[in-house]
Image (spheres, rainbow, N blue to C red):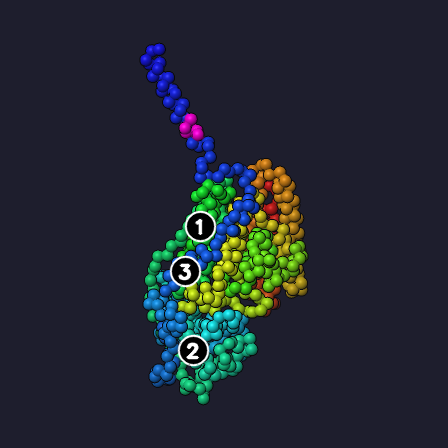
Amino acid sequence: MQWWKVTLLGVGLAALFGLGIIVGHFAIPKKDEPTSSPLQDLDQELLGTVMSQLDANRIQENLRWFKFDPAPFPTVNPGGTILFSARRSEENLTGEQGDPEVVQPYAAYKPRISGPCSSCPLMSSPIWTPKESQQLSPPTNPSRVQGELRTTWAQPEPDRVPTRLQQFLRLLCTSSRHHVLAGLALPQFPVTRGAPGLTSSLCLLSNLRGPVAPAAWQGALGCQYRLGPGFLDSGRFPPDSQVNVTVHNRVELRNSSNVLGVIRGAVEPDRYVLYGNHRDSWVHGAVDPSSGTAVLLEISRVLGTLVKKGKWRPRRSVVFASWGAEEFGLIGSTEFTEEFFTKLQERAVAYINVDIAVFIHVGATGRGLPGDPAQSVIFSAAKQVPAPENSALTVYDRWLRHSNRSSPAHGVIPSLGSLGSGSDYAAFLHFLGITSMDIAYTYDRSKTSARIYPTYHTAFDTFQYVERFLDPGFISHQAVARTAANALLRLSDSLLLPLNVSDYSETLRSFLQAAQDTLGPLLTQPGISLGPLVSAVGRFEQAAAALHQRIETLKNNPSDPLKVRMVNDQLMLLERAFLNPRAFPEKYYYSHVLWAPRTSSVPTFPGLANACEEASKTPHDPEAWAKVRKQLSIAVMAVEGAAATLEPVA
């Protein structure tokens, strides 16, 4: 054989061999990658494995790992002599409060105080809102109060914690003036971090004069609460004494970062299930937010280990987020939603938030939207998690016992708290229209009206407090981790998204019924009919029922990936259909027609309810009724659009 033929044959064989290696590299599944299929679905066995590997001891060590190592309020007489000075810091009861790294209480965003508001008479009320102001005689507009220092208080907390930790008072100085901060005109904010402390507050409040506060306003400091202004004639201070407030804040720009981790999806990497918790805290922050961070770290450890071992990869991408600067106004998560607005609106399936994982060792609950499609996800997850205090029960069973409601479709079910703007879910829900939920272990609402845990935002919020009082053994933290991870896997791995759109039919029907029963008689006066809204709700109910039937059919024969994708997109985008950025022009970030803030007591579409409440005050004002018609049109458009989202593609 000629030499050139041998050479050519060798080159050809080498090329074939190389091609074989390349084909094999891409065609043969890698050892560290699980095989994927367009029909990949939730694996119940893997779900059980994940929940069993979520370790309470590791969550405890996560929390232990974080290092948990505030201007005075003097009272002066008219001549300026200091008669009494409040504590400059919280009392060092357990050792952690004296740590040199503890930031002393201060008023975030509060401009420097000087002039007429720096020395003022003292008045008293609960958390100051327009509703409370109307109970005063005469009613007071809080936006027009000037030259008064107003002290506010909270409700008694459960008795599991030391009595002296039960009340943490807040002071605010209200004014109609506006101040410029970083180039923005801002109203003068409440002093939410400038508390004078329990002992000092008791000294001031027990000497306050004026009318006795209403029964609902009486607190738990052991004295009779009065409204002020000024002090008792026979009290510790001269009656005309004033409280001097000085704020030495500086306007500074500081960097804050979001930390993200992504597990790329195997089948639908362009669909995102997000799980988030903020990282910043006011002081030690063992509960808020580090209890949630400890849970996040444990869930990411278990799922990350499965990925590294090649035993699992989600169908959809999972995004873990540690948000920065939440305490300063949800800055981290809000900036994230603004920067990736288009991508998130097109691709985000859901957002799970775990901020304060455990309020108290009593019973689990989820916060979402009652009647929202995500309700079924939270309930399904809770039914698979043993209750930490009684393994014979599930988290769902305990939840049902402590807080429940009656559902026309499902009977008696656990009550879901509402999602307002108190944590990082706010921008995802109200701004982007992404299905959201918040999961925590919290109070038995049948036994207490407590809103928050006693050491909230104080130097007493420490690891020792959590370990000793809040959750010994960290078994409630483990229950939250299991519930949140279960919900996360259901959303990331299910072939068909487990969102029950028929639950929204119940919500819309209840909203319509409330509007008919309460607002109907009022609307007849200007000749406004709810007929279009009745038709829209009926159309939505039909569309939701029809989509449910198509989903059941598709479950039996899910062989067409495009049909699966189409239905999932309908489920994912339903929440977006209720957005209208022009519905509430005075509330920039609130666009959700169903869940925007409602000042009216009527449990219906908030824009319609609020507009009707205002119109009832000026029944002969045509502009007021024009706003009612506008809000009714917005509600009808939203419901019609949502129904169209669920209907089959033509």
The residue labelled by disc 1 is: 301
Q: Relative to 133, is 357 above or below?
A: above
Q: Residues within 10 Å of mark 3 (few under 14, many from 20)?
A: some
- The secondary structure that most of the magenta stretch takes on is helix
The residue labelled by disc 3 is: 64
In the rendered structure, find residue 199 and report the number of the disc placed on it. 2
Q: Dot 1: what SS?
A: helix
Q: Is residue 310 visible?
A: yes
Q: Relative to 519, is 197 above or below?
A: below
* Quarter assignment of residue 460: bottom left
In the rendered structure, find residue 177 and report the number of the disc placed on it. none
The magenta stretch is 20-24
Q: Residues within 10 Å of mark 2 (few under 14, many from 20)?
A: some
Mark 2 vs mark 1, foreground winner is 1
Q: Where does the image place residue 607, in percent across and percent down from the top left?
A: 56, 60
Badges 2 and 3: C-beta atoms under 8 Å apart? Answer: no
Q: Residue at 42%, 26% (x, y): give it.
A: 20
**Residue 78 shown left or right of residue 647 in the figure:** left
Amino acid at circle 2: Thr
Quick one: which residue is furthest to the top in this view?
1
Q: Residue at 57%, 65% (x, y): give it.
A: 444
The quarter in which the C terminus is drawn is top right
Q: Residue at 62%, 56% (x, y): give it.
A: 507
